[in-house]
Amino acid sequence: MKSQLQLNGSTTRLQNMYIAKSIGFCALACVIILRGPQCSGKTEVSQRLRETLNEKLKKRTYLLNLNEINTERFKKALNGALDKKYKYVIGELNYGYSHNTDPRTWLQPFKDKYYQIVSFVLVGGKQVRLQRCKNDPKYSPFDKIDASFFNHDSEIFERHEHDRIFYKKSSLGEITLNTENKSPSQLANEILS
């Protein structure tokens, strides 16, 4: 299945397609960043990527929470991710500036160790994502999915994407993947194919 890719950076579409096609066979260590608004599929896709890379390709994979707000826990997790036994690091990131306001501080250690870094933005319609949130088993019955909060969160993400905050601070080109009508496994396969 051909992926519908959209360019959100300074690299060309051909370069991004080459990067996306080479992830599964990357000779260097690789960081895969999954960005997207609430309920866009980041967690499920990252889990499918990890399963695929670990089981099918026999590559050790580390899931890095780039949204961790506790500095000490983040540093510990970052050091764990930089351990040479992991060929792939998959990071989930909401707005593109989380943990601190400058993603270069956590990207630089990967660059220093010659990791290939590629970023995907997972997007889908608001109504589809709101329904995913309501059906998400992680939420307890006591968690009320408030549509106004959800819309506010979506607007923040859209504003940051419009202003290209992550790109401006990281200089990474990004590949946009539409998540509607696709399973996490399908998206993981698109990323790795």
Image (cartoon, rainbow, N blue to C red):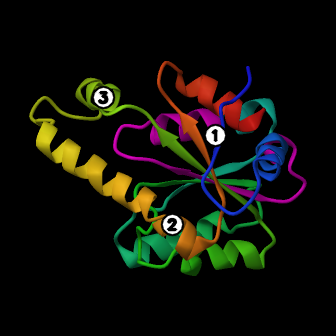
Q: Secondary structure at mark 1?
A: helix
Q: Residue at x 86, y 59 (%)?
A: 28
Residue 148, x across and y down, in percent: 12, 43
Residue at numbered disc 3 = 136
**Residue 151 appearing in the image:** yes
Residue matched to label 2? 166
Identified by mark 2, the residue type is: Phe
Q: Residue at x 53, y 33 (%)?
A: 178
Label 3: element kind: loop
Res 168 quadrant in image? bottom right
Verify CB contact (< 8 Å) between mark 3 and mark 1.
no
**Residue 95 lies within the magenta run:** no
Where residue 43 appears, as percent x and y from the top left, is 46, 41
Question: Are the residues tagged 1 and 2 within 8 Å (C-beta)?
Answer: no
Residue 44: where, in percent of width, then height?
A: 49, 34
Instruction: Determine the CA span between mark 1 and mark 2.
Output: 24 Å
Residue 167 lies in quadrant: bottom right
Number of numbered labels in the structure image: 3
Q: Return the residue nearer the eye: 112 or 149.
A: 149
For residue 50, the mark is: 1
Badge 3 amino acid? Asp
Q: Secondary structure at mark 2?
A: helix
Task: Check disc 2: other Cα within 10 Å, few if <14, some if 14-19, many if 20+.
Answer: many
The magenta span reads 23-50
Q: Earlier in the sequence, mark 3 or mark 1?
A: 1
Looking at the rendered image, the disc whose residue lies closer to the viewer, 1 or 2, is 2
Residue 159, x across and y down, in percent: 35, 58
